[in-house]
Image: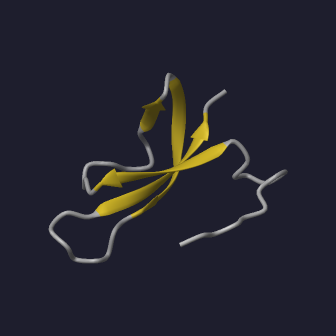
Amino acid sequence: MEQKVQIIGTAYEETIILAVRRNSKIDKSMIAQYQGNKYQIVDFSKDSSGLPVGYDLMTLKLKK
């Protein structure tokens, strides 16, 4: 699936989206570290497929 989003000048500028293995312990109050940078979790979309091994999507914003 391909999705294009215009984000320049919005709250989603300097964000990345990562697919992570389903983990019920993840919440928005946590700080994520990825490739040496720290990120605030701004959105967390849980997999609703019902499969035993699922993936969730985390939207991360670079912490300044």
Q: In the displayed image of the protein, which residue is found farthest to the top?
A: 36
Determine the image quadrant of residue 61: top right
Residue at 61% from the left image edge and 31% from the top image edge: 63
- Extreme left residue here? 52
Check the image and tell me how it is coloured. secondary structure
Q: Which residue: 41% across, 39% down? A: 30
Q: Residue furthest right?
A: 9
Q: Position of residue 52 (x, y in %)?
A: 15, 68
Where 64 falls versus 4 (above or below)? above
Q: Residue at x 47, y 32 (%)?
A: 34
The count of marks equals 0
Q: On the rendered structure, is 48 left or right of 43?
A: left
Residue ID at (26%, 49%): 25
Q: Residue furthest bottom?
A: 49
Q: Quadrant of the C terminus?
A: top right
**Residue 49, position in %: x, y?**
28, 77
Q: Is residue 64 above or below residue 24?
A: above
Above-or-below relation of 14 to 17 = above
Q: Is residue 23 left or right of residue 18?
A: left
x and y, in percent, of residue 48 in the image: 32, 75
User: Observer-nearest residue: 16 or 11?
Assistant: 16
